[in-house]
Image (spheres, rainbow, N blue to C red):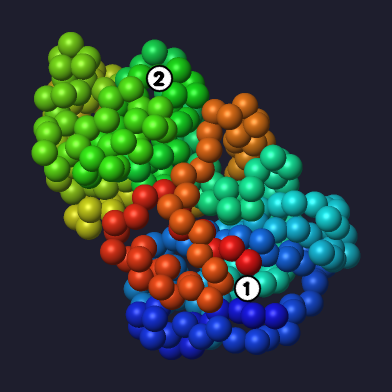
Amino acid sequence: MRSWKVTKLGEPNDVLELQEVAIPKVEPSHVLIKVEAASLNFFDILLCQGKYQEKPPLPFTPGSEISGVIQEVGEGCQLQVGKRVLATPQLPNGGLSEYVVVHENSVYEVSSAISPGEAAGMFITYQTTYYALYHRANLKRGEVILVHAGAGGVGSAAIQLGKAIGAKVIATAGGPDKVKICKDLGADIAIDYTKDDFVSIVKSETNGRGADVIYDPVGGDVFDKSRKCIAFDGRILVIGFAGGRISEAPVNHALVKNYSIVGVHWGLFARLYPGKVVEIHKELMNLYEQDAIRPLIYREFDLEEVPQALEILADRKTYGKLIVKF
């Protein structure tokens, strides 16, 4: 089988090699999956560069999200051959391979209606966002949510999951094309942050009250400005720091305006409460079958195009998810 290997650290174009390797053997409680699609994430680039918090031994195969069909099950495994699934392979044996072996606890059955690319691109983004909005923020019908980077992977999920619960969704994005994407996803209001002040628009749209929930995967200046348009009893969700700078929040401001700054570490939640992850996955599959959510895919690439796809992702000019098809 063919498998992408990082043989040394550096830029993806320089360090990734597409190699012919043996199909891995199935261990007890594991399954062999024939991969149909894989999702690319920004941290795949950091892994290649050796800049990610996790540093697997060389050589390793990146790729944290895949979809495919179970070909073989190991001793004691409860899953069945022939089932369509999504899975989260563990480093150093990631998902950018034609076949992967994954522990059954990291495998989730998917709806027959979902395409391989959509299945591969929905797990981390929608799990993170569902946990953030429905568990951490307790978003309610009729509340107002401000979603930053609405055309991105987690942002696009937040728009859809916000609408699914009946919230009013205000989204920000950079440029008219991404603003249109946010509107197409269901945002009630979409703001081009490159030319408009989202603080004044949010205040105007809420009669000066502000947003009940702010979903922030950007951080930096965006977080600082968000504090100016959060409502009384509001919740600012700290999803990540795509903007590069980690903000420092003056806690006296949180006290005076009576809002909460809520951290969202889905990865730790998933390790501590794997049963809850299964429950969320079932809810997401139900929402997909109801056509309430639909993963936003920028483009599907062939397996041979992985280095070029990661280069495109590194430019940060894409939207949604980049998918590798097998």
Q: Are marks 1 and 2 in contact (CB under 8 Å)?
A: no
Crowd rating for badge 2 (residues with CA inside 10 Å; few <14, some 14–19, many 20+): many
Q: Find disc 2 in the rendering and name its residue.
A: 167
Q: Is residue 117 left or right of residue 175?
A: right
Relative to 273, residue 292 above or below: above
- Image quarter where the N terminus lies is bottom right
Q: CA distance from mark 1 to mark 2?
A: 40 Å
Above or below for 232 versus 175: above
Q: Which residue is mark 1?
A: 97
State the image coordinates of residue 211 (x, y, percent, origin top left): 26, 22
**For the point 28% across and 64% down, which residue is it?**
315
Residue 325 as seen in the image, left or right of residue 13? right
Instruction: Check the picture and name the quadrant holding the C terminus.
Output: bottom right
Going from N to C along the chain, the mark reached first, 1 or 2, is: 1
Residue drawn at 45 percent across, 38 percent down? 157
Please tell me how crowded label 1 is: few (under 14), some (14-19), or many (20+) other residues with Cα within 10 Å.
many
Secondary structure state at the residue bearing disc 2: loop
